[in-house]
Amino acid sequence: MSTPPGPYDLIRRGMDRWRPGWRERAAKRKSAWDVLGLVVGFAILFPGFGYCFFRAAWALHIRFYPAHAGHLREFWGDGISFHAFLSSFLMAVPLFVPALFAGLLVSNVLMWLIPPARRVMEREAAGDPEMTFRGANRGLLKFGIPASAVCFVLSFIGLATLYSLR
């Protein structure tokens, strides 16, 4: 009797199917600049884009429910009902996806602006068009735009159905 595959195995199988060659590209990324790029991308994610997207969603929510103006501190407060939690979760959490893609795109641009980082990353790309600056950003946009659109719609559904903060 075999054991079912774990989440990591499922992710690897999916990546093998949808992104052929991803293992080889990942093996080429060995410089400290690659790590710094990820750190910068995630550092931009939450305080930067995540906050801005949430505040924009909250501002739009206030257009639907003006009585909630000035009550942001009650968002996910004590005694929240299941409906309010579900709507607020739907409003806030999907915004992580577009914030992630935006943070990684900005990180790529910032790393590209540093000449030593650019040289190392061009050397790592070594003819692989998906690892170049243009190819990496094209890939992020290819997946990021549709995923972000879906997540913005989910967030809109959440903010439009959040009629009570309790």
Image (tube, rainbow, N blue to C red):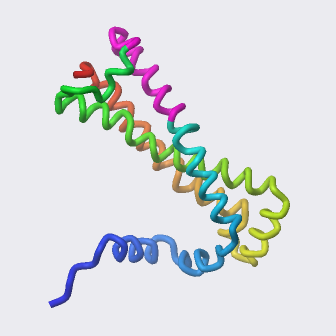
- Outermost residue toward the top in this view: 67
| Coordinates of residue 136 in the picture (x, y in percent) | 65, 62
Percent x, y of residue 21: 56, 79
Going 75% across and 78% down the picture, which residue do you hit?
A: 126
Taking the image as shown, residue 13 lies to the left or right of residue 136, namely: left
Identity of the residue furthest to the left in this view: 1
What residue lies at 66% left-to-right and 58% top-to-bottom? 37
Instruction: Tally the numbered discs.
Output: 0
Residue 25 on the magenta span: no
Give yes or no for residue 57 being in the magenta stretch. yes
Residue visible at 73% across and 75% down in the picture: 124
Q: Position of residue 101 (x, y in %)?
A: 55, 50
What is the residue that sits farthest to the front in this orientation?
Answer: 78
Locate residue 25 relative to residue 97 in the image: left or right: right
Q: In this view, does 98 lie above or below 139?
A: above
Left or right: residue 153 versus residue 162 is right
Residue at left 46%, top 42%? Answer: 149
Relative depth, front residue between 50 and 101: 50
Say which of 143 and 54 sits in front: 54
Q: In which quarter of the image is residue 140?
A: bottom right
Above or below — where is 150 with respect to 92? below
Which of these two is toward me, 166 or 4?
166
Q: Quadrant of the N terminus?
A: bottom left
Question: Residue 25 lies in what quarter of the image?
Answer: bottom right
Q: Give the range drawn in magenta.
A: 51-70
- The quadrant in which the C terminus is found is top left
For the view shown, which residue lies furthest in the right direction?
Answer: 115
Residue 64: image x %, image y %? 36, 16
- For the stretch drawn in magenta, the main secondary structure is helix
Q: Is residue 66 depicted above or below 73 in this figure?
A: above
